[in-house]
Image (tube, rainbow, N blue to C red):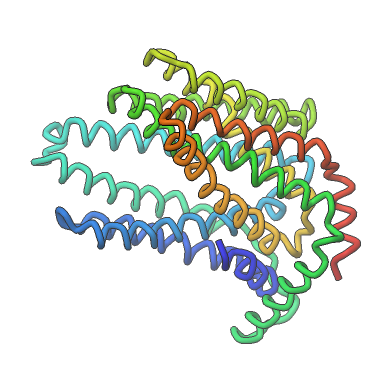
Amino acid sequence: MLIAPLLGAIADVGGLKKRFLFLFSYLGILMSVALTFVGEGAWEAALFIYILGNLGFMGSNIFYDSLLPAVAREKMFDAVSGLGFALGYLGGGVLFALNVWIVMDPAWFGLESTIAAVKVSFFSVAVWWALFSLPLFFFVKEKRPQREAGTTRLIIEGYQRVRGTLKRVAQFKGLVYFLLAYWFYIDGVDTIIRMAVDYGMAIGFEPKSLIFSLLIVQFVGFPATLLFAKLAQKWETKKAILLGIGIYLLITLWAGVMEEVHEFYLLAVMIALVQGGLQALSRSYYARMVPDAYAAEFFGFYNFLGKTAAILGPFLIGTVALLTESSRAGIISVMLFFIIGGILLLRVDEKEAAKEVKSALP
């Protein structure tokens, strides 16, 4: 979280978005492979490898997101961002389904135990990740910098750019409002993503039912994200995001009162209808406010806020559940993030925000 804006600024100055994307991606890939060698009970090693793998994934997202202005014209931001998330859901769903099958029936694949199946699954993730990274590395073009600079100079210039941006932050009124709105509502989204299985177990649902619900989200999320992006093109991106936030309010309220497992499946469908769309349109909406020459730096701030948000939601759920002795009260408390995020988003005009940013930067 803390190094994201600086790395983004260095990438902008040096034309290093793809190189940083490669380095972080392959850190994640190598750590996925490393998990296959963790012995039984070696939780310390597993934790260390997982942290590095997560760093690789989150770090690569900064530079992946920042390439959006390089691969699409502004009027196509919603469509391209939506297609990216939709294919992510499809690819993730296919591999996840395969891994579930391997773990549930290891003998069919010639494996001797569930432990062996889990290790094969980790290795398959690494292969999948590496394979589908190749088209980006080979075919996506990145603008080269106007002048070459050494490593030390790039770090100094990157630091100076971040420092200058932070000094001008008061001039980015619209951008700041959006980032605050995003911080709140994406906290709600990420919290539901991370806590859904734990919550389902807490209210008594079987693990197999919860895995099935995750598969529903992946496969329904593919066409739903494309439809949401199409809605934004025909309607308006901001209105589509607000619609997604409103649906999440209903989802959170329903989650707090549901009783039966079939309701959990219906809830998974509802989440799938808006989760990818909200993520994709937030990225494209933000990209419209950010100059291409500062894209990686500003997406560093964007991802910084997204990752800090992922801490607060689970903390709120845990605290409320502890105080009230009710997991249902904990999940309902997440509505607060969507309400605040929606109110702040109403104050954002992306065209005015883009003008403010452009006029303030050198």
Quarter of the figure with residue 264: top left
Q: Is residue 244 left or right of residue 271?
A: right
Q: In this view, does 12 lie above or below 66?
A: below
Toward the left, the furthest residue is 112
Q: In this view, does 151 lie above or below 200?
A: below
Toward the front, the furthest residue is 323
Picture residue at 63% right of the left edge, 70% below the top: 6
Please state which of residues 312 and 120 is positioned toward the viewer in this rendering.
Answer: 312
Residue 196, x across and y down, in percent: 43, 32
Q: Is residue 319 left or right of residue 1?
A: left
* Image quadrant occupied by the C terminus: bottom right
Q: Is residue 219 left or right of residue 336?
A: left
Quarter of the figure with residue 346: top right
Residue 221, x across and y down, in percent: 52, 28
Picture residue at 49% right of the left edge, 63% below the top: 22
Picture residue at 83% right of the left edge, 66% below the top: 168
Residue 53, x across and y down, in percent: 39, 58
